[in-house]
Image (tube, grey):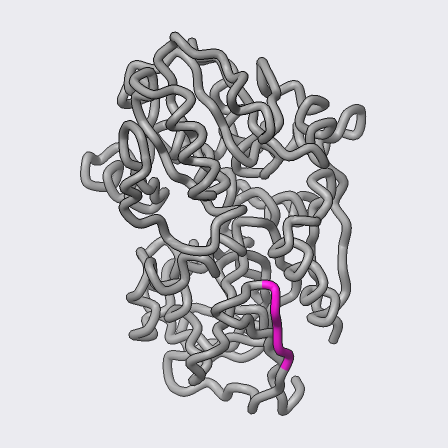
Amino acid sequence: MSDLNRRLMTRKTDPGETLLESVAAPEPGEGEVVLALDRFSLTTNNITYAAYGDAIGYWRVFPTGRDDYGLMPVWGFADVVASRAEGIAVGARVFGYFPMADTLLVQAEKISKGGFADAAPWRKAVPDIYNRYVLCAADANYDAALENPEALFRPLFITSYTAVDFLREHDFFGAKQVVVSSASSKTAYGAAWCMAGDDVRLIALTGARNRAFVEGLGAYQAVYGYDEIERLPTGVPTLYLDLAGDPDLRRRVHARFGGDLTYDCLVGSTQGDAFPTDDPELVGPRPVFFFAATCLDAHRERGTLRAFYERFFADQRAFFERVVDPAAPWIRIVERQGLDEAAKVVRALADGVSDAAEGAVVRLVR
């Protein structure tokens, strides 16, 4: 293992601007583990982490010691390369939440045959689900052949799935149609896939560049461009499932539906650059931010978490298989090599010019 740990930091005021630097590699103390990141995904979800970094606490999860640059969190697979924690063996493979860096030092706690958690005090900034590492060898749902789609979609599909679970629990707030912004995003069409059997009409909103891709998915009953919002069908109770997080777009959607808009469920921020604040110009219900971790906590409190996960894992595997179906894949997964390539992907995602039909997985060169 190198004496240096490379890390790709992100300017907090511009998620697309990155800085690659090297710091001393970590040495584990008693009860600590060093994880070497092997592969991770980059999607607009990571841009959302940056956009909400201060409001929700994502910037605090992996401290850099700097005020101007933070470590944008990513999801992926890593290997244990050093361990002084009983029950965690060198060579074990894990899935979890990481900084874009060669290695991560973890203060292991809650160790079980299925995994462990990071007890570092700064990890308390986010819910527990972000701090757990799954040991792949003990994960009945793990398939080495599906690591790339899992790295891409596992953190997104849990949001898609829990959001739809939440909306169903509230009978879609009386809506008969759901308007989905940033419909080309993986979380958006994951939610659309989940709602395929529900009694709601799904309307996609997307940019001109991604329209053909969204139409090709076949996941929505209708597709409109952002320049066509004033043509969206009204007169029907409508729910806005907002993945874009764009305040101007939100105002236009609210103005179009007026009293027909029953609920604004804010899930992501592919086009916004900050957590939403009260907007005096907004017509109708204010946006309510949906947080998947809160939904999972509610299941835990009700004692229904095990049943939820049984449904989730079965449906998640079916979704993974659908998106990479060789006969008609929804996306093509492209592997990039190294943090320099990761920086290019981050810039494209932040600028909104990435290819919706491509899923980026970064492998770290050793």
Residue under the point 69% across and 64% down: 342
Q: Quadrant of residue 146?
A: top right
Indicate yes or no whether the magenta region holds residue 111.
Answer: no
Q: Is residue 273 visible?
A: yes
Range drawn in magenta: 16-20
Please indicate whether residue 22 sits to the left or right of residue 360 in the image. left
Q: Main secondary structure of the magenta part?
A: strand
Q: Is residue 111 left or right of residue 227?
A: left
Q: Residue at x 34, y 31 (%)?
A: 264
Identify the residue shown where x is 41% and y is 79%.
32
Q: Position of residue 143 (x, y in %)?
A: 63, 44
Side of 224 relative to 129 (left or right)? right
Horizontal and vertical percent position of residue 82? 54, 79
Q: Nearer the viewer, residue 208 or 36?
A: 208
For image coordinates 54% across by 60% down, the residue present is: 74
Q: Where does residue 89 sit, x and y in percent of width and height?
A: 51, 71
